[in-house]
Image (spheres, grey):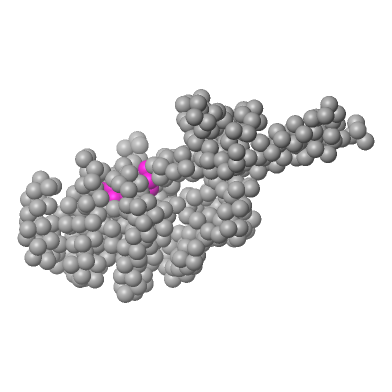
Amino acid sequence: MINIRTRFFRASPVIGVMLFLFGCTTYNQSLTSYYKNVYAGNYPQAEKDLDNNGLIQKPRNKLLYLMEKGRVAHLRGEYESSNKYFNNADQLLDSGLSGAADAAVGLLLNSMSQTYKGEDFEKFMIHYYKALNYLYLNNTEDAIVEARRITLQAQDQGDKFNNKDNRYSNDAFALMFQGMLYERNNDVNNAFISYRNAAEIYLKNPDQTYYGTPMPMGLKEDVIRTAMLNGFTTEADQFEKTFGIQYTLNKPNEGGELILFWENGLAPVKTQEDLFFSLVRHSDGGLFFVNGAGLEIPFNYSGDRNRVNLKSVESLRVAFPKYIAQTPYYLSADISVNNQQIPLEKAEDINELAFKTLQQRTLKELGKVLARLAVKKMAEYGLRAAATSDGKTNGVLEGLGYGVQLYSLLSEKADTRNWQSLPSSISYARVPLQKGVNKVNIVLKNAQGVAETKTIEIQGNGSIQFYNYATLR
């Protein structure tokens, strides 16, 4: 029996490493078939892959499942079905996805085992797609409801971070889109407020950029134009001076205009990165995790800090998420209509948002992970020390020590989930329309300068219309 037990203990680390390597599959790798079919435009098969995938079918991933289903249904032109999924996702978010049990799972296991609660920018994108779906279904009233929900989402986001300027506490593109929806509904006053709020987000930064996106000229003109339409001459003059432009209010186009969104590429994927830390004690008795790169994170330990044995936490491996950008096939696009060339302007850089928002919360999340791992390590060290405290080996305690070691090794996994079928970026243009049929050409160029043209027909009817075009590769 002793030989069998000894062999088992000696083999445990090897078994652990094998199981650990097997368990390191990322979220993206687990849904490879689904994403390949999305990229290829094979949406029926993509939906089947999603419905048959065991990982995304787990209750903790329900929000992800609903967002992915909503996006694919939207791409298929099934707008009513798309909003069924997005409405269910909204209801999940409204009901709250946190709880004591879920927090305990994060503490004892890892964040990948917790309920997925969505990235902050993903929540704004739900309203974007829902509003477009409603417009395509000729349901302007519900589209305006989504416009109002953007304001509520912005307030929740601001409250979450106490409106700190250096955090993602609002979304400029969502506010721009909100203004467009109000303008579509002939609510010029609320449109001006939305455009102004979006512009003020850009103006908080000296270079007038927001998460990798320079303030679009279209937004500057929208602010001034709606100010003029409302008779706010003082505000219009002020913004002309701020932007350094002079704007002339022209008569509306007879055929109205098309607001065209170009959704290019795909959001970055998350992978797992291993970071290594040690626990040190400062001269004032404070405990800190440090790594070779000079990163220092306080250990908020609830027990007696003076009794913490630093040898028990000499090295910690932290599995942490890391984004990897997906390079889009197309690098630029322009609009050609009725002998006019109209440039597209970037309005949202989801790729940049993903990287920056993860960076903003890195220290806080690393602190949680390190604290969890340190407690496990101290428990493991304590059991091993107790197993040999009297000069003899206590097999039970030794076994428990190895068990804690294996548990710590196997349970450590980064949360590599995110809504990966979102576009990498969104650009837009306001396209003037003639009355009747308009052939709108979207000219796409790849890295080699090779151009491809997508032509759509829009019936100019004097109103504002919307169209979103996605290039997924």
Quarter of the view holding residue 232:
bottom left
Q: Would residue 457 appear left or right of 36 to someone viewing this image? A: left
Residue 469 visible to the viewer: no
What residue is at 55 percent from the left and 59 percent from the top?
Answer: 99
What residue is at 24 percent from the left and 67 percent from the top?
Answer: 182
What residue is at 10 percent from the left and 45 percent from the top?
Answer: 244
Q: In the image shown, does 289 or 208 lie closer to the viewer?
A: 289
- Please state the horizontal and vertical placement of residue 174, each as a whole percent of the image: 31, 57
Q: Would residue 65 appear left or right of 3 to someone viewing this image? A: left
Q: In the image shown, does 79 or 293 lie closer to the viewer?
A: 293
- Please state the horizontal and vertical placement of residue 469, each as a whole percent of the image: 35, 56
Which residues fall within the magenta stretch? 345-353
Q: In the image shown, does 197 or 333 lie closer to the viewer?
A: 197
Residue 176 visible to the viewer: yes
Question: Is residue 220 on the magenta stretch?
Answer: no
What residue is at 22 percent from the left and 40 percent from the top?
Answer: 207
Quadrant showing the N terminus: top right
- Please state the horizontal and vertical placement of residue 252, each as a whole percent of the image: 13, 65
- Please state the horizontal and vertical placement of residue 208, each as a whole percent of the image: 22, 43
Q: Would residue 221 appear left or right of 372 to someone viewing this image? A: left
Q: Would residue 297 appear left or right of 460 to someone viewing this image? A: right
Question: Is residue 352 on the magenta stretch?
Answer: yes
Q: Is residue 137 above or below residue 24?
A: below
